[in-house]
Image (cartoon, grey):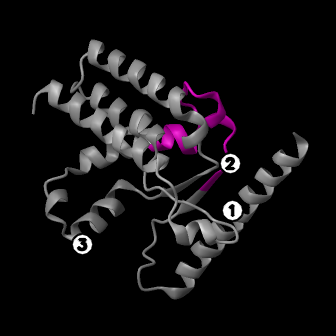
Amino acid sequence: MSPVSHLSLQSYACLSRVRSQLQSPSVKLQQAENPVQFYERSVYSDRYVFASNLFECGNLSDTEWAVYQDWHTWLLNQFEPEIALDGIIYLRAQPQRCMQRLLRRGREEEQGIPLEYLEQLHFRHEAWLYHRNLRLDFDYLNNLPLLILDVDDDFKNDRIKQEAIVDKVRFYCTFIFLLFMSLIFII
């Protein structure tokens, strides 16, 4: 795959995430008492994890990386009020565990993904979300509430572990809701 194809695919992936986050919530979600919308990846992970990995691995040239960053910043600044995140949940697992789960799923499109690639993505997630030592171009991300869930242990068939994770997420979402409500009253 040529570098141009990497840039095109990464730009398209980001644009797809922006479109997804701009879509109106479903009727069911709109009618919920305390609606919460989750995204598997954000427009920020697109840049700080996936696109930066392409650049660091030599799949984007300096010029392409600069163009992508400029385009990404412009795009997000255009829609930031509508796509701003209220919080981030980081499902933290070692790359080896992710590889085991990937192989167990058996999805055709995931076959052939090397462990090295998962290690690279893990390193970037860790720098951004765990160590918080990544320079971010969107200042509000530095103060965003973050829930880190250790999901290295297998919980697929363990109801107690599943409930513990759900309880942590529920508590976190309540915290975000209360924080958001307090910000409304302060203004």
Which disc is residue 145 wearing?
Answer: 2
**Mark 3 — residue?**
104
Residue of label 1 = 172
**Disc 3/disc 2 C-alpha distance (Å):** 32 Å
Residues shaded magenta: 125-147
Residue in the image at 22% along x and 24% along y: 58
Quarter-wise, where is residue 89 in the image?
A: bottom right
Alpha-carbon distance for marks 3 and 1?
30 Å
User: Which residue is nearer to you in this view: 173 or 71?
Assistant: 71
Pointers 2 and 1 in contact (C-beta within 8 Å): yes
**Would residue 112 be found to the left or right of residue 45 on screen?**
left
Q: Residue at x 76, y 51 (%)?
A: 180
Quadrant placement of the N terminus: top left
Q: Is residue 3 left or right of residue 172?
A: left
For marks 2 and 1, give the CA distance. 9 Å
Q: Tell which tag, 3 or 2, sits nearer the viewer.
A: 2
